[in-house]
Amino acid sequence: MTETLQLELLSTIHCKQQVVRAVRFNIDGSYCLTCGADKKIKLWNPHNDLHLKTYGGHANEVLDVAGSSDNSQIVSCSSDKSVILWDVTTGQPLRRYRAHASSVTCIKFNEESTMAISGSIDNTVAFWDVLSRRQEPVQTLRDAKDTITSIQVTDHEVLTTSVDCHTRLYDLRIGKMISDYIGSIITHGSLTHDGQCLVLSCSDGTIKLIDKDSGELLNTFMGHETNDYLLENCINDKDNQIISGSATGEIFYWDLISSNITNKLVHKFNKPVVSISHHPSDSILLSASEDEIKLWGVNNKE
């Protein structure tokens, strides 16, 4: 049985971004980024409730954001169809990439942060070389038949999920793609830390645990409500709990093996928790609902 830590609300930050579209921890969990309907990205120290910097330059809502592995750069994507690479310290845009034909929904760096990978409503995934001055993508994947909803990147793989009900796993070492039909719209996909399983949030109100190699369904997690929101999921630092927001304002924790609900946190009653981000090495979670983010953790101030 998984030991369940009693998480408490440590702090609430009002971001003043109209609606926060995504919250993301940086690589070591000391800072976080938020992006929102106000067309801006904000850098925070959520542990001290500190707003550090604001990045403005998109012409429309910023839908996703990611920090580089050395914390020196940020990449963001927007419904203005563009991807922007930012210098963290100066707050200035270093590059603007425009090749997508529609809103860019998700963005990630690769492990070395030499490449930014974006997914769009135009059904494509684009790879941008952030080290060169090249303005067009070095590669574009056109396998999806509908909107790309999420991207995950490992040292040699890219996982994409789509409204076309398929996951696509690209092995970059051997140039191979494996596609799996899941049966309902996939709003978000994650990989377990051991790299063996896919965790897929689906519009039918389930989260599915799929064996990456065989495609076999290993477990189904239920109890939360999706209500047409593109809810995200994540896995805790110990790789034994699946976490998701809900349209009802709660955050659900399930045991990976038993699929039992082990914890339920209330972010904001009846307001959808659209974005969550787990600390890379501690039992700390960030959640976003409307214009606020909350930091959850174990209160050690006994």
Image: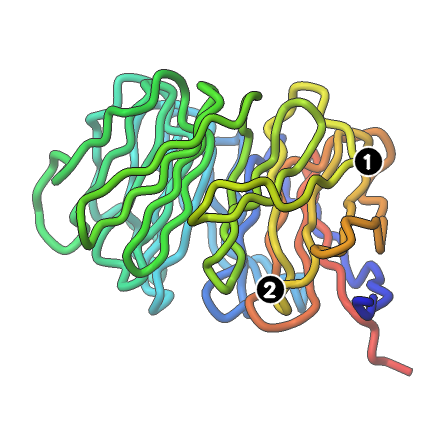
Residue 101 - label: none
Front: mark 2 or 1: 1
Task: Please indicate whether residue 188 sits to the left or right of residue 94 in the image.
Answer: right
Of callouts 2 and 1, the N-terminal one: 1
Q: Is residue 89 placed above or below 159 in the rendered structure? A: below
Q: Which amino acid does label 2 sit on?
A: His
Q: Is residue 187 placed above or below 183 in the rendered structure? A: below
Q: Quadrant of the N terminus?
A: bottom right
Q: Residue 29's quadrant in the figure?
A: bottom right
At 16% from the left edge and 48% from the top edge, which residue is drawn? 129
* Depth order, front residue of 16/11: 11
| Residue 58: x %, y % from top left | 36, 32
Residue sticking out furthest to the bottom? 302
At 35% from the left edge and 26% from the top edge, which residue is drawn? 120
Q: Residue 71's quadrant in the figure?
A: bottom left
For the residues marked 2 and 1, what is the alpha-carbon distance in whole angstroms?
Answer: 24 Å
Q: Is residue 172 placed above or below 178 in the rendered structure? A: below
* Depth order, front residue of 215/110: 215
| Residue 47: x %, y % from top left | 66, 67
Identify the element where label 2 is drawn.
loop
Identify the element where label 1 is drawn.
loop
Q: How crowded is mark 2: few (under 14 residues within 10 Å), some or many (20 or more)?
A: many
At 85% from the left edge and 54% from the top edge, which residue is drawn? 263
Task: Please indicate whether residue 252 sits to the left or right of residue 62 in the image.
Answer: right
Q: What residue type is labelled 1?
A: Gly
Residue 223 - label: 1
Residue 279 - label: 2
Q: Residues within 10 Å of mark 1 (few under 14, many from 20)?
A: few
Q: In which quarter of the image is the C terminus?
A: bottom right
At 23% from the left edge and 31% from the top edge, which residue is drawn? 141
